Amino acid sequence: MTKRITLLTAALAASLLAQPPAGGPEPRHMRPNHDQIKAHLNLSDSQVQALEQIQQQQMDAVRPLMQQIGEKHRALNDLMQKGGADPTAVGKLVIEIDAIQKSISQKQSSSADQARNSLTADQKAKLKALDDTRKAMPAIDQATALNLLAPMEGRGTMGGPRGFGPNGFRQPGPMWQPRPPN
């Protein structure tokens, strides 16, 4: 539960940091690059626009819920900081946060369904193959770490040139993941 609260707090902080300062100028919106998925699935320009619109609608629907979670987390933290917090009040806040999280998950699932339903049968088949590949990525990373597979062309063994990450710094990868206890 604590891990879940921490993750949601981090997500909320990230979304709040992405907001423009009150009274400040609006951020310039750069259009994300979807060229590779557009080519892979053979998406039309209108399909990409529709998918972007679905994504924006989801973010607009989820933003106030994330703000509610943030408010409830602050209230929960205030209760816990005081010491001797009323267990009923704490439990009520936790239940309210959980209900909001479920609502967010439901909205995200609904948006994902709407997005997938906008694809043709051929595009859905290609998307399924892409998802299958994504699920195999941990095994591919581990096979590469054990030299069973060659690193991707132009990349070092650690995800970047000559053993460094994409930005030139060493980055943890599959080889540095802790092993589960025996």
Image (cartoon, grey):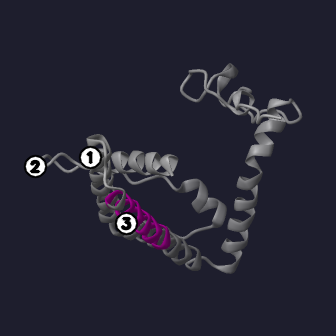
User: Which is in the foreground here, disc 1 or disc 2?
Assistant: 1
The residue type indicated by label 2 comes to Gly
Q: Which mark is residue 96?
A: 3
Could you classify mark 3 by the number of other residues whose Cα lies within 10 Å: few (under 14), some (14-19), or many (20 or more)? some
Q: Which mark is residue 23?
A: 2
Placement of 30 over or under 63, stated as above or below = above
| Magenta span includes 55 | no
The residues colored magenta run 89-107
Could you classify mark 2 by the number of other residues whose Cα lies within 10 Å: few (under 14), some (14-19), or many (20 or more)? few
Horizontal side, residue 138 vs residue 25: left or right:
right
State the separation of the CA atoms marked 1 and 3: 16 Å
Q: Secondary structure at mark 2?
A: loop
Depth check: give the residue in front, 101 or 56. 101
Write the residue at 72% across / 33% down.
Answer: 174
The residue type indicated by label 3 comes to Glu
Q: Secondary structure at mark 1?
A: helix
Q: Secondary structure at mark 3?
A: helix
Give coordinates of residue 67: x percent, y percent: 29, 58
Horizontal side, residue 160 vs residue 139: left or right:
left
Write the residue at 18% across / 45% down.
Answer: 21
Horizontal side, residue 72 vs residue 117: left or right:
left
Give coordinates of residue 153: x percent, y percent: 74, 34
Disc 1 vs disc 3: Cβ atoms closer than 8 Å?
no
Depth check: give the residue in front, 178 or 27. 178
* Quarter occupied by residue 145: top right
The residue type indicated by label 1 comes to Asp
Circle 1 sits on which residue? 78
Write the residue at 35% across / 62% down.
Answer: 88
